[in-house]
Amino acid sequence: MKANPLEIDPHGRKSGLRRLTWKARKEQHRRTVERVPEVVIKVQGGGKTVADVRRYMKYISRDGMLPAVDDQGEKIAGKEAVKNLQDKWDMDMGRGQDKLHQSFNLVLSMPADTNPDKLFVAVQRWAAEQLPNHEYMMVLHTHETDPDPNPPKHPHVHIALKAEDRDDKRIHIRKATINIWREAFADKLREQGIEANATRRRDRGVSKKAKSGAEWHIDKNFKDGKLHRDGTPYEPSKAQAARFAEATQELREGTVKPKPWEAAMQARRRDVLRSYKADADRLRDEGDVELAAKVERFAAEMPPLTTERHEMQRAIKDQVQERLHAQQTKDLSGPVSP
């Protein structure tokens, strides 16, 4: 039996990546070196109670003001229609109330210049393919319709996804799941004429993980000097504060050593560079000299590996140097004896 060229790679099942044909891999290289936009899929938690799910569906639809679509492609318009859909899900019978997620909140997005209508069609087709036995509700948000007080400029689609499918089986969203979803999402976008790519961070030379949606908003509001509704200022997220304290302690104690995951990052970078070199050599052998050169240049220009810990420690050292320089300047410009 001939193998499907897009099946899960048997040597990389944990990643969920597909085994691409050489033709498909060349096309992916083209998109990568040309910096084609990468698709974004985020799982922003979910509701553990019926009330949580109701709040989220109410929020993304602006209490029924924004048109929504369910898993059957039916339009859900109006406050009463949203409530009826919630009732139809029969979440009161779900297992693990208050302990297990009754739903998951997904967000699929692309850059600001993406056609929102085509994006929405792509997401609908993606969901029909990837979530065929699940109930969900999706809503398109643009800069003009997003209910957030500080709406992002890029169009995105929110999906309230019921955790249990029609056979009462729970969905488990893992890293491999996201990888498969991203590749499928990019496919659907390209079918709509939207340039889209879905590669691993390591293949793009990105070494830092993205922050969670909640942590990103907290830290952004802190940096922007925004205030809570009660007038109190935002503070860095607890997770970031803990990481900063650890980075500071290491500098004080002189115990800054590579972490195990940083050694793993170095090993993955070497693998990526070897892979790019092998593909560039093959492209050149086939006569595609231009793409081969672009692949080599892309690999050579990858930014150095870094982590948030490294950046924090560099910032701390820079602050210390600035203070020492300021003190030395003050001492030199002190009063001169007559």
Image: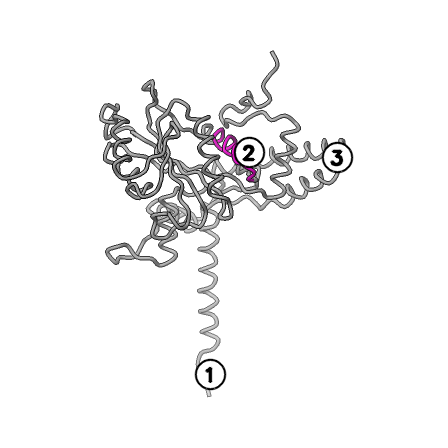
Viewer-nearest of labels 3 and 2?
Answer: 2
Q: Is residue 5 magenta?
A: no
| Residue type of the residue flagged with mark 3 | Arg
CA distance for labels 1 and 3: 70 Å
In the drawing, what numbered circle is on residue 289? Answer: none
In the drawing, what numbered circle is on residue 336? Answer: 1
Q: Secondary structure at mark 3?
A: helix
Please state if 110 lies on the left or on the right of 97 as rendered.
right
The answer to whether mark 1 and mark 2 are in CB contact below 8 A is no
In the drawing, what numbered circle is on residue 284? Answer: 3
Characterize the local packing of mark 2: few (<14), some (14-19) or many (20 or more) Cα atoms within 10 angstroms. Answer: few
CA distance for labels 1 and 2: 75 Å
The residue furthest bottom is 338
* Nearer to me, 241 or 319: 241
**Which residue shows up at 40% across the image and 41% down it?**
140
Please state if 78 lies on the left or on the right of 310 as rendered.
left
Q: Which residues are magenta?
A: 179-194
Compared to 196, does 22 lie above or below? above
